[in-house]
Image (cartoon, helix red, strand yellow):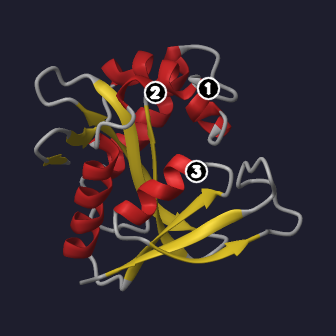
């Protein structure tokens, strides 16, 4: 899969991305809210299995099947972040998820990637809306969600579930509807 925007490319993850994936997942701004991308992976090679899994799903247009893509710079093809889509089973809804290297945050790259992947999801499926679930403490990501046209519907606090990796036990639930 490959989606090109003005400033980024969303593309299939490749083994060459393992080292960047490893380092980005350990950056404090990423690890703070998404530790599951780093935990249990002590070396860049530990991402090979995950990359293989996502490569198999890369061109599948069933957006309920979870997969992630590289967000890369068009001129160098360097991975600067990741974006994905899939069924959030606990909610039975299709969710987008993303992270961006600290070095490349606040440049509009993630916004372009979210908008492009959301547009693709609506083109290849009949889903009525997509969701984002964002830790309440993650102020920059919450602002970004609204800039991308996602509407904040509510604050949620799951009971007995820490799989949302939240600092404050709550997350904001957003939706973006098909236009």
**Picture coordinates of residue 5 (x, y %)?**
13, 47
Front residue (pair 45, 29): 29
**Picture coordinates of residue 51 (x, y %)?**
41, 34
**Mark 2 and mark 1: Cα distance apart in space:** 8 Å
Mark with earlier residue (2, 1): 1
Q: Quadrant of residue 85?
A: bottom left
Q: Quadrant of residue 116?
A: bottom left
**Mark 3 and mark 2: Cα distance apart in space:** 15 Å
- Crowding around mark 3 (Cα neighbors within 10 Å: few <14, some 14 to 19, many 20+) is few
Mark with earlier residue (3, 2): 2
Q: Quadrant of the C terminus?
A: bottom left
**Picture coordinates of residue 35 (x, y %)?**
67, 36
- Crowding around mark 2 (Cα neighbors within 10 Å: few <14, some 14 to 19, many 20+) is some
For disc 2, the marked residue is 102
For disc 1, the marked residue is 28
For disc 3, the marked residue is 139
Which residue is pictured at 10% across the width and 24% down the height?
Answer: 75
């Amino acid at each position: 899969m490959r989606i090109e925007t003005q400033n980024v490319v969303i593309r299939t993850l490749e083994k060459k991305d393992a080292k960047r994936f490893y380092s980005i997942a350990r950056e404090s701004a990423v690890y703070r809210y998404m530790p599951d991308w780093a935990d249990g992976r002590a070396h860049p090679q530990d991402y090979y299995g995950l990359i293989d899994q996502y490569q198999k799903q890369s061109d599948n247009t069933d957006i309920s099947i979870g997969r992630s893509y590289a967000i890369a710079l068009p001129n160098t093809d360097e991975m600067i972040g990741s974006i994905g889509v899939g069924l959030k089973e606990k909610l039975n809804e299709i969710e987008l998820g993303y992270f961006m290297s600290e070095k490349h945050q606040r440049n509009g790259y993630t916004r372009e990637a979210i908008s492009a992947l959301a547009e693709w999801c609506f083109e290849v499926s009949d889903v009525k809306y997509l969701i984002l679930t964002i830790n309440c403490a993650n102020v920059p990501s919450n602002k970004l969600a609204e800039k991308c046209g996602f509407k904040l519907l509510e604050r949620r606090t799951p009971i007995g579930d820490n799989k949302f990796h939240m600092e404050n036990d709550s997350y904001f639930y957003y939706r973006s509807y098909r236009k």
